[in-house]
Amino acid sequence: MIDWSEEQQLAKDAIRRFVEKEVAPLNEELEYGSMPPYDIIKKMYQTFGVDEIARARFEKTIEREKAIEAGEEPSQFESSSNMDDLGIDTILSMELCRHSAGIVTAMGVTQLAAGAIMSQGNVEQKHRWGLDLLTADKIGSWAITEPGSGSDAFGGMTCTASLQDNGDYLLNGSKTFITNGPYADTIVFICKQVEEGVAPRQRKILTFVLDKGMAGLDQSKPLRKMGLHSSPTGQLFLDNVVAGPERLLAGLKTKSAKKKSDPKATFAAERAGVVSMSLGIVERCLELCIDYAKERVQWEKPIGEYQLIQLKLANMEVARFNIENMLFSYIERKAKGKAMSFAEASAMKLYSTQAAVDVASEAIQLFGGNGYMSEYKVEQLYRDARVMRIYGGTDEMQVRAIARDLLSR
C-alpha cells in the first residue's frame, strides 16, 4: 500500500468535513469547558457506519466461535480483515487529531477494552460486554496503571483478587491515569491473584470485566492535566468489589475460552494505533506552518523565504512521509493477517511520537510568540502530542522492548 484507495480518499474527505463542522466549533468547550466527547463519538460512528461495520465484524466472530465449539475447522469461517475498513478506522483517528486528539484517546481506549474482551473472552462475555463497546453504545476503560507502578505496570502491580470459597473474587486496590475512568460503563480491570507462598511480583495476572455502579467501586471526577483535555482521565478505587467467575476473562472452562489472559497483546495494539494519531498532528502542524510561512512578513518578505524556516518545513515533511509509510505498512499487514510483533509496534510508537512532539515544538518556534498563544492552535497540538511519548508505554519502555527483541535473536 503506497496511497489511500479511491474509496478511502472519499471517506477521508467526508470525515474531514464532519470534523470541521461537528468538532472544530466545539473545541473551546472540549478544551476548557466540561463537555465529554462521547456524544460526538457516537454521532460520528453512526454517520459513517462504523457501528454497523462493528456489528458485522462481531457477528462473524461469534459465528466462528460457535463453529469451533461445534468441532468444525476454523479455516472455514476465517474472515480476512478488510483494508478499507481498517483504513477508515485509521482515517477517523488522523482527522480527529487535527483538532482534538483527546477524542481519539477516549474513543481508542473504549476500543482497547472491547479488544481485550473480544480476544480473551468467551461467547457469553463477548455478547454481554463486547458489542456495546465496539459500537460506542457504551464507554469503556482499560485499567492497568497504578499510582506506584508507572512503567513497571505488571511487576509493581498491587491491586489484588482474592479467590473466595464460593468461587467469587474480592477485588481491592486503586488505579490512576485511567482514560474514560470517570464515565466508563465497562471497565477491563487488571490485577494479581493473591497466592500464598508466591512472591507478589510472580503472582498470576488476572483480567476482570466490571460494570459502573458495582458495590465498592468508586470512579473519580476527571483529573486536570496538561493536554488531551477532551479525553476525561480519572482514578478508580476498589474496596472488596465482588466479581463472579463469569467476569474473569479467559477464566471459564469452556471450549471458546482457551486463550490465556494477555494484557501485553492489548499494549501492542495500543502502540500501533498511536501512529495514526501522530500523523494527524504532524499533518496539521505542517499545514499551519506552511500557511503561516507564506503570510508572516519579516524584514519585508515572507519568512518562508528564509533558509532556517525552510529547514524546519523540510524536516516536518520528512517526518510526515516516514510516519505515513509506517502507517500504510501497518494497515496492509493487518489486512493480510500478518501480525506485528511487540517490538515492531514499539518501534513505530517510538519514532512516530517523538517525531510528532518534535514537529509540534518546531511549529511553535516557527510561529514565534504567536505559537505560544492558544489562538494559533499549534500550542494545543504540542500539548496533545507530548503525552504520547508517555502513555501506552514511555519512550524508555519502547527502547527496552526493541532492544530485548534484537538481543534475543
Image: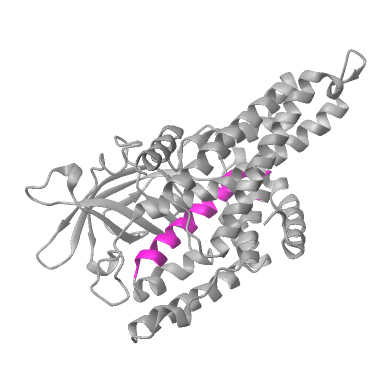
Q: Does residue 256 appear left or right of residue 327 in this picture?
A: left
Check if residue 107 falls in the magenta segment: yes
> Going by the picture, which residue comes out furthest to the top?
299
In percent of width and height, residue 10 lies at 77, 61
Question: 237 or 384: which is nearer to us?
Answer: 384
Whether 392 is drawn above or below 17: the answer is: above
Question: 371 or 256: which is nearer to us?
Answer: 256
In percent of width and height, residue 132 lies at 48, 68
Q: Does residue 396 appear left or right of residue 298 in this picture?
A: left
Picture quadrant where residue 290 is located: top right
Q: Does residue 314 appear left or right of residue 402 in this picture?
A: right
Q: Does residue 309 appear left or right of residue 344 in this picture?
A: right
- Looking at the rendered image, the quarter that the C terminus falls into is top left
In percent of width and height, residue 139 lies at 47, 59
Q: Is residue 35 visible?
A: no
Q: Is residue 85 visible?
A: yes
> Going by the picture, which residue comes out furthest to the right?
300
Residue at the location (36% across, 51% down)?
264
In percent of width and height, residue 219 lies at 37, 49
Whether 3 is drawn above or below 157: the answer is: below
> Going by the picture, which residue comes out furthest to the left?
197
The segment highlighted magenta reads 96-121
Q: Main secondary structure of the magenta part?
A: helix
